[in-house]
Amino acid sequence: FVSEVFSSRPDWQVVTLCITAIMLLQQALSFLIFRRGELLFNALLFGTVFAGNAFDFMHFDRDFISAVLGVSLLLIAYGSRNLQYKAVGAITYLSGSCLLLWGAFELLENTPLEILFLGLCSVLIFLSTKAQSKTLLFCATIGMLQYIAYFTGQHFVDSVGWPIALMIFGLIMFGVSGAAVRIQRKYISSPSDK
């Protein structure tokens, strides 16, 4: 259709912006009328694709785009936590936390501020208790464990202390996993889950 309408070669980024804007509008209006979770999910999907393309069209750094979209999705998920669309909230927490952690790691990697990624994971674990989200807790815990594995692999792999670092890493994994389970049981699980 685009090739037929445009006589010259179209800019696909502009075309994608137009299509996702139309689909976002259509899905959002349909959601307002029918109040179905699938329509809310589609509106969030097209809104995220539209925003990502708009930032990319303005030549923002892709890692920055990922982090901003991740924060936005987490805020949307947190803001809609009391709505009846629990599955959409879980998917939004999953995609938002993955985008945020991916973008933040890429922005902080090999900089003096790289250790802040561990702080971000800790903040997300804390926020998972406030949001009562198992999905957010899972993603933040996995992000923390992956960063610890990355850090030990980068700094201890060629040293004599590597076996000791592996043992320490294993103990840290046990500790973080145990803490995540305790947090999930104490703050996230409802009384009917226990």
Image (cartoon, rainbow, N blue to C red):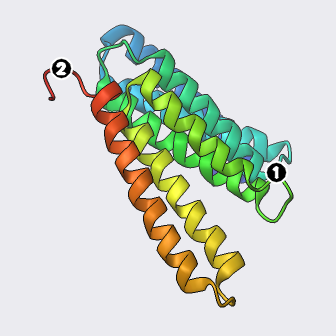
133 relative to 103, above or below: above
Q: Which residue is pictured at 53% across the width and 42% down the height?
A: 97
Q: Position of residue 180 (x, y in %)?
A: 38, 43
Q: Picture quarter containing residue 151?
A: bottom right
Q: From the viewer's perspective, tell me whether residue 37 is left or right of residue 23.
A: left
Q: Secondary structure at mark 2?
A: loop
- Residue plotted at (39% across, 59% down): 174
Say what secondary structure mark 1 lies in: loop
Q: Which residue is mark 1?
A: 61
Above or below, 5 against 190 in this view is below
Q: Where, quadrant-wise, is the C terminus in this rendering?
A: top left
Q: Are marks 2 and 1 in contact (CB under 8 Å)?
A: no
Residue denoted by label 2 = 191
Q: Percent x, y for residue 192?
A: 13, 22
Q: Position of residue 73 (x, y in %)?
A: 55, 31
Front residue of 125/24: it is 125
- Tell which circle, 2 or 1, labels the residue nearer the N-terminal end: 1
Q: In the image, what residue type sits under mark 2?
A: Pro
Residue 158 higher or lower than 35, as above or below: below
For residue 103, side relative to residue 125 (left or right): right
The one of 123 and 95 positioned closer to us in this rendering:
123
Tell me: 18 left or right of 87: right
Task: Identify which amino acid the numbered label 1 is placed on.
Answer: Asp
Q: Residue at x 53, y 23 (%)?
A: 76
Instruction: Count the numbered circles shown.
Output: 2
The answer to whether residue 141 is seen in the rendering is yes
185 on left or right of 113? left
Give the farthest residue toward the top.
Answer: 33
**Mark seen at residue 175:** none
Residue 79, relative to residue 60: is it above or below? above
Q: Residues within 10 Å of mark 2 (few under 14, many from 20)?
A: few
